[in-house]
Image: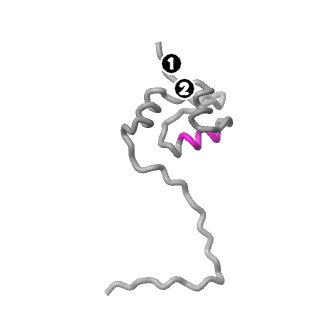
Amino acid sequence: MAELLLTPEELVELTHCKRNAAQAAALASMGIWHQVRPDGTLAVSRAHVEAILAGAGRSKPVRQPKLRLEDDEAPAKPRLRLP
């Protein structure tokens, strides 16, 4: 019988990360749902991963927030004014 969840070794192979927090971030960026167990390890559905990797339910990738810093010395960018 096929395993319901990915093994820890398979998670490392999929995410290229060994730490649980890094694995969770990698999975989230790939759009793969996961649950964090009480001991901190991840539970990831094998069927969901196979469906995502096969292209089923593909949607926009999850955007990571980016920090924007404004430079006080930089000239202001002109803004377009609509009539």
Question: Dot 2 corresponds to which residue?
Answer: 6
The quadrant where residue 24 appears: top right
Disc marking residue 3: 1
Q: Which amino acid does label 1 sit on?
A: Glu
Element assignment for label 1? loop
Residue 48 at x, y percent in the picture? 44, 31
Q: Give the range drawn in magenta.
A: 21-27
Whether 80 is among the magenta residues is no
Looking at the image, residue 38 lies above or below residue 77: above
Looking at the image, residue 31 lies above or below residue 49: below
Looking at the image, residue 68 lies above or below residue 52: below
Q: Is residue 6 left or right of residue 79?
A: right
Q: Which amino acid does label 2 sit on?
A: Leu
Category of crowding for the residue at label 1, using alpha-carbon neighbours closer than 10 angstroms: few (below 14), some (14–19), many (at least 20): few
Distance from disc 2 to disc 1, alpha carbons, whole Å, reads 7 Å
Q: Is residue 11 left or right of residue 45?
A: right
Label 2 close to label 1 by CB (< 8 Å): yes
Visual colour scheme: one colour
Category of crowding for the residue at label 2, using alpha-carbon neighbours closer than 10 angstroms: few (below 14), some (14–19), many (at least 20): some
Residue at point 45%, 49% (across, down): 61
Residue at point 37%, 37% (across, down): 56
Residue 43 at x, y percent in the picture? 55, 28
Residue 6 at x, y percent in the picture? 54, 26
Q: Which of 30 and 21 is in front in this view?
A: 30
Q: Nearer the viewer, residue 51 or 69?
A: 51
Magenta stretch, main secondary structure class: helix
Residue at point 62%, 70% (across, down): 69
Which quarter of the image is occupied by the C terminus?
bottom left
